[in-house]
Image (cartoon, coloured by chain):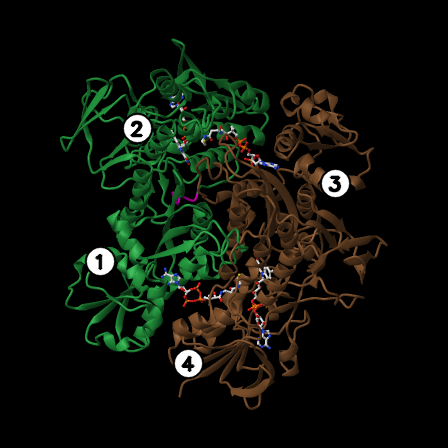
Chain colours: A green, B brown
Amino acid sequence: MSKRVLIVGGVAGGASAAARLRRLDENIEIIMFERGGYISFANCGLPYYIGETIKERQNLLVQTEEGMEQRFNIDVRTHSEVTKIFRDTKEVEVVSNGKTYREKYDYLILSPGAAPFVPPIEGVNLDGIYTLRNMEDVDRIKEHVTKNKPNKAVVIGGGYVGIEMAENLKHIGVDVTLVEAADQVMGPLDFEMAKMIEKHMIDNGVNLIVGDAVERFEKNNGLEMTLKSGKKLNADMVIMAIGVRPEVKLAKEAGLEIGERGGIKVDAHMRTSDPYIYAVGDAIEVEDYINGTNTLIPLAGPANKQGRIAADNICGRESVYKGTQGTSIIKVFDLTAASTGNNEKILKRQGIPYIKSYTHSGSHAGYYPGAFPMTIKLLFSPEDGKILGAQIVGRDGVDKRIDVIATAIRAGMTVYDLEELELAYAPPYSSAKDPVNMAGFTAANILKGDMKIIHADELKNINPDEYFIVDVRTDVEFEGGHLEGAVNIPVDELRKRMNEIPKDKKIIVYCKIGLRGYIAYRILVQNGYDVYNLSGGYDLVLAYQM
Amino acid sequence: MSKRVLIVGGVAGGASAAARLRRLDENIEIIMFERGGYISFANCGLPYYIGETIKERQNLLVQTEEGMEQRFNIDVRTHSEVTKIFRDTKEVEVVSNGKTYREKYDYLILSPGAAPFVPPIEGVNLDGIYTLRNMEDVDRIKEHVTKNKPNKAVVIGGGYVGIEMAENLKHIGVDVTLVEAADQVMGPLDFEMAKMIEKHMIDNGVNLIVGDAVERFEKNNGLEMTLKSGKKLNADMVIMAIGVRPEVKLAKEAGLEIGERGGIKVDAHMRTSDPYIYAVGDAIEVEDYINGTNTLIPLAGPANKQGRIAADNICGRESVYKGTQGTSIIKVFDLTAASTGNNEKILKRQGIPYIKSYTHSGSHAGYYPGAFPMTIKLLFSPEDGKILGAQIVGRDGVDKRIDVIATAIRAGMTVYDLEELELAYAPPYSSAKDPVNMAGFTAANILKGDMKIIHADELKNINPDEYFIVDVRTDVEFEGGHLEGAVNIPVDELRKRMNEIPKDKKIIVYCKIGLRGYIAYRILVQNGYDVYNLSGGYDLVLAYQM
Ligand SMILES: Cc1cc2nc3c(=O)[nH]c(=O)nc-3n(C[C@H](O)[C@H](O)[C@H](O)COP(=O)(O)OP(=O)(O)OC[C@H]3O[C@@H](n4cnc5c(N)ncnc54)[C@H](O)[C@@H]3O)c2cc1C
Ligand SMILES: Cc1cc2nc3c(=O)[nH]c(=O)nc-3n(C[C@H](O)[C@H](O)[C@H](O)COP(=O)(O)OP(=O)(O)OC[C@H]3O[C@@H](n4cnc5c(N)ncnc54)[C@H](O)[C@@H]3O)c2cc1C
Ligand SMILES: CC(C)(COP(=O)(O)OP(=O)(O)OC[C@H]1O[C@@H](n2cnc3c(N)ncnc32)[C@H](O)[C@@H]1OP(=O)(O)O)[C@@H](O)C(=O)NCCC(=O)NCCS
Ligand SMILES: CC(C)(COP(=O)(O)OP(=O)(O)OC[C@H]1O[C@@H](n2cnc3c(N)ncnc32)[C@H](O)[C@@H]1OP(=O)(O)O)[C@@H](O)C(=O)NCCC(=O)NCCS
């Protein structure tokens, strides 16, 4: 007799598992239950449908119920919620259109996803306050926008979904205020990198409030919000996007093990504590590829791959998930921000030793038009240079460089390996030394002791009497703004004017991005000075002030 | 006493070595000799200056003589040709403005580059026939173009420089014919991938002649060319771009070892057969990272990195060059073509066993506007799936995927590793399964025997009586063109119509790109058929016919 596999959730993880199961085995009986009205929709495209970049609702439906049945011979049941798991009899209870029934399984795959977190604050259920997760949500928001033509919206939460919604609402002419409780938007980025995004949002007309939170919603000429600070905001509509929580109710009630981060616990085969039940996607905890702890990574790439892995294992093919790097990316108006591996906040929290270095490079050769600078923050091990993480913010070519570094991390590469990468170069695409090579050179120089650095966030802690600061940019650049107390000696005059630099102090050199600072560093250090180059240059100082 | 290092050639390899030497050691005496009038210019930008994408000549000069002297304290001598090396006395002979003199060295770095190959055919030295290598060349071509406003140009050679010149001359309104002697343009690509480029060039108005060569130039109302085929061409100007030859005269006369590919022989430290002489860049032979043989890779990335490595070693820092993958890329009007590692032609020649697979994926999620398909050809080892090479042609995102695969090759990854790569996904940038993941899945499926394939170029060799061909696309697609003898059964009807497929024949299934063919394959194979999926689908068949 053929196997019977039931799947809970019909979108990223669930549908991928179903398709893979069928490809591996024509004879399995596969039933996919989806609580909502749609399967296989493009969650990630939802904000862009609101913003009218994606014009046709139809385009969000990557695969339909009928399509899935015809192509993969899957019994797809929408509007069908799985409400209980009877592990002893290997059955589930399904509620559909008011009817309740049971189905038997040999294997069960849970891919229920994660639900937008809605904090229990006053008025949070008032009309006009939305979350965004599925087609039903997007339809509701679209209807509000179309019918009510809101002038003002407040987006609560500065993560991926919040920022994407802010941008998309601006696109259709809505005045947007974004409120973020933390001191920065975009948790996966470190503070100084997030500030670049924030500045860009403000430049694009988003009213940005960080470090404040909504305490109360009231109906008052639309919606009125009172923030912790006492500030009041008004809006015609509100998007709540302060993060998601794994959907674990079903699993929990069935007695499946839940991890300490609140996700369903699975082994590397995606098997839960019950060997006949697999779980994948936003609902599970996975191992962090860098630090080995458990983590929640609500992203589509991992969900789809995990679905495939669960299917493999159910079909008797040994297949393991090796953990997540959390590689992610977001478009913020004209900027792109991306990260992979651990950020500085995580490394600190985990007590993992690291060095950080910053480089700014052009997206392609400067002499070919259209090149834009990007900032790369690289985190690596002080022991062997192993890459621990990277963050990049820029206008163009950011996705390429984060993917290259993500691949390098997966391969266990070091910053020395980045120096050697042979990447494709022609003027429209890169430079003879790609930004990734450049990040590698710079990191390797630090690691080998060829360049001692100081960071922008350390400047405030230094004793001004101990240090002599040299700004090695041109006088024009210097006049446009410089560090307090800095003396301007352009790098090209440094050899001649070295007598202006005292021998009895530590020297900090800096330029705009770090490169000329490094050259100045090499000149001074070989002349007996104790020198520190400001990593990332004055641009990084400015980033902190954004 | 401080070391004295002389450098021959002041552009990519030479200038990089000089700068690095200075950063490592303030006390070395560095003299850089450049035969031409310019150092550190953007060779790779020259065609775009002709095409007016790069508007200012100034922008081509990345660094100047004065700049190099000020910043790096290098004694730069332009218009100074090194004409002899006296290895016994460690001296060179320099000819500059009619004067000849000698300079002593402790170490000598040769970075003389490669010269455009000019075949000894009749009339090849006539006025109006140009090669393109340096500023002097580009000035000459620019002058011709500006003064004579040519209507017609012939470009000879369909490599990087030839194609870039063809495109750039089209940009300024010149009618361009490109003549290539081989049966395809762009040697680094295999035939079927090159055909995509060729079609695009033709679509953009280039008159393309492949498989024919110029035999004779004559002055006749401008320039007249007679081709091998007897065909005659006329033009106001001609660009000769049939490849480059390493500049080894100086090295050869000095008795340095020359390799069998005609480049200067160096070890991994960039040291020639004389331990006091290093050589880098286009003039040398390097090891092919994939197959271990010696090869010539006239590319800027390797040249710059090798210059840095030579400098390191001269300063007593052990630093090695681990070989080249030949990663390269070219913009051809709206297309991008890129390759890394070995192509099929090389693998065949070297007798290295390989499997090839083709996938076509969107540059980003299909539901987000602006996605374009790209074709990925992946070459990998039948033994362990180690990646041997890749070629990609498409409109957008090609550079990213080639760099990811180049990184994977450098790390010694297999196609199984490509399946697992965690790449950055948001709709504007990629899909939840990136094209590189997709290429990995498909290759892994072939390797594991989950999908047997047949290639488009094998179709002509099969015995039609042995095979039954099923086109699993929709009827509309089928009617738009299909394989001879194919029967149309759309994949979604396959389970119901399986009785139409004979059991006593081998079955070839195909769709547009290979994906639906694969799904059909899985259905049929599990129903007892002996099936082959056409790798890359009908699109690959069309590529061969382009
Ligand atoms: C607005 C938005 C933008 C996003 N952008 C990106 C992005 O750019 N990049 C990225 O990588 N990720 C993005 N994501 C995240 C990505 O969509 C998720 O990581 C991915 O969809 C998770 O897959 P999943 O299968 O675990 O859950 P889902 O895709 O959410 O599917 C779970 C499904 O299970 C159903 N379900 C739950 N419980 C039951 C039950 N008991 N019975 C029946 N059905 C049930 C739910 O209705 C839901 O449809 C975005 C998400 C959202 C909401
Ligand atoms: C039009 C064009 C487009 C290109 N596009 C790309 C591209 O997109 N991507 C890419 O990777 N590569 C590209 N390249 C190739 C790239 O420019 C070379 O690989 C690189 O410049 C090689 O560096 P090199 O130092 O070996 O030689 P070069 O940069 O050529 O420098 C050699 C210098 O040495 C001088 N010289 C030679 N002999 C002597 C002597 N005896 N005495 C004094 N001086 C001497 C020469 O005058 C020359 O200026 C392109 C090249 C050209 C010409
Ligand atoms: C639509 C959906 C059901 C498709 O699932 P799928 O069939 O597994 O995925 P794809 O259509 O990408 O196809 C991938 C398969 O085709 C194969 N394939 C791809 N290109 C191929 C080619 N050219 N030749 C042969 N095989 C190919 C792959 O190997 C893979 O098969 P495998 O897993 O058996 O190895 C699922 O992706 C889905 O529901 N997506 C929408 C929801 C979602 O992901 N949301 C979050 C992101 S917005
Ligand atoms: C202009 C030229 C002389 C510069 O050479 P260079 O100084 O070695 O190269 P760059 O300007 O790219 O600087 C790289 C150095 O800066 C360092 N650097 C880069 N960004 C940095 C930062 N933000 N902070 C600190 N250091 C940085 C790198 O580590 C590297 O130093 P290292 O080699 O000592 O490790 C040389 O590249 C050249 O001649 N180019 C034009 C010719 C050419 O390449 N043609 C072919 C391509 S068109």
Q: Position of residue A59 (x, y in %)?
A: 50, 25
Residue B161 visible? The answer is no
Residue drawn at x 17%, y 59% is A461
Q: Which mark is residue B28?
A: 4
Name the residue at 39% across, 28% down: A47
Above or below, comparing residue A231 to residue B423 in the picture: above
User: In this figure, what is the number of numbered marks?
Assistant: 4
Question: Could you tell me which secondary element the residue under label 3 belongs to?
Answer: helix
Q: Which residues are magenta?
A: A322-326
Q: Amino acid at mark 1?
A: Glu
Chain ID, mark 2: A
Do the dots labelled 4 and 2 sit on one chain?
no
In-front residue for pair A303/B528: A303
Residue positioned most to the top? A98
Closest to the camera, between mark 2 and mark 3, is 2
Which residue of the protein is positioned furthest toward the right in this rendering?
A: B230
Give B92 or B450, whichever is nearer the viewer. Answer: B92
Q: Which residue is mark 2?
A: A175
Mark 4 or mark 2, whichever is nearer to me: 2
Q: Does B286 appear above or below A435?
A: below
